[in-house]
Image: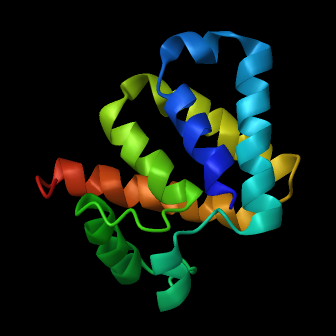
Amino acid sequence: MYRAVNKPVYVMIERKENLKSASLRDAMFDLLALAVARYGHGFSTVAQQRGIMHLNVATLNTHLILIRRGSEDGAGCQTTLLQLLNYHEHLAEPVADFAALVGTHYQHAIFVDELMAYVVISLAARSDGLR
C-alpha cells in the first residue's frame, strides 16, 4: 500500500532539481522516514524473510548480491537508496541527510546502522572489483 506513495518519491529524488528545493526535499524525506519508522519500509522483504536485520558482514554481502541482481520485489528503503546511489552520485549528501533525519527525528537508529553497513560493504566490493 505505501508503495503507491514511496515509488513516486524515489523517482522525484533522482532529479537534482527536486533536491534543490528545501521544502520539497524535506517533504520527500519526511514521507520516506515515516514509512521507515512506522510502516516497516526500512528493510526489504527479502531481508525480513531471511532475518537479515543484524550487522553480519557475510549476510549483508549476500544480500547485496541479491540487490545487484535486481531483486526489487518488496524493496525496502535501504535497497532502493543503495540502487539509487549506484546510479546517481549527486545523492550521496541527500541520503546522508535522510539517514540523519531517520536516526534523530524518527529515532530509528538500527535503520541508519544497517544503511551505513550496506554502504561500506558496497564501497569495499567496488574497490575490490566485485561490482
- As drawn, is 65 to the left or to the right of 19? left
In which image quadrant can residue 3 be found?
Answer: bottom right
Query: Could you say which is closer to the camera, residue 13 or residue 53?
Result: 13
Q: How is the image coloured?
A: rainbow
Q: Relative to 21, does residue 8 appear above or below in the rendering?
A: below
Residue 112's x, y, as percent? Answer: 65, 57
Query: Could you say which is closer to the camera, residue 60 or residue 40?
Result: 40
Residue at the outermost left position: 129
- What residue appears at the point 57 percent right and 65 percent down from the top-left corner? 114
- What residue appears at the point 44 percent right and 22 percent down from the top-left corner? 90
Q: Relative to 63, does residue 68 appear above or below in the rendering?
A: above
- What residue appears at the point 32 percent right and 40 percent down from the top-left corner? 86
Query: Could you say which is closer to the camera, residue 54 or residue 23?
Result: 23
- As drawn, is 3 to the left or to the right of 59? right
Residue 12 visible in the displayed image: yes
Residue 72's x, y, as percent? Answer: 39, 62
Residue 16's x, y, as percent? Answer: 50, 15
- What residue appears at the point 80 percent right and 17 percent down from the top-left corner? 23
Residue 64's x, y, as percent? Answer: 33, 66
Residue 51 visible in the displayed image: no
Q: Image quadrant for the N terminus?
A: bottom right
- As drawn, is 35 to the left or to the right of 104? left
Q: How many marks?
A: 0
- As drawn, is 95 to the left or to the right of 65? right
In which image quadrant can residue 96 be found?
Answer: top right
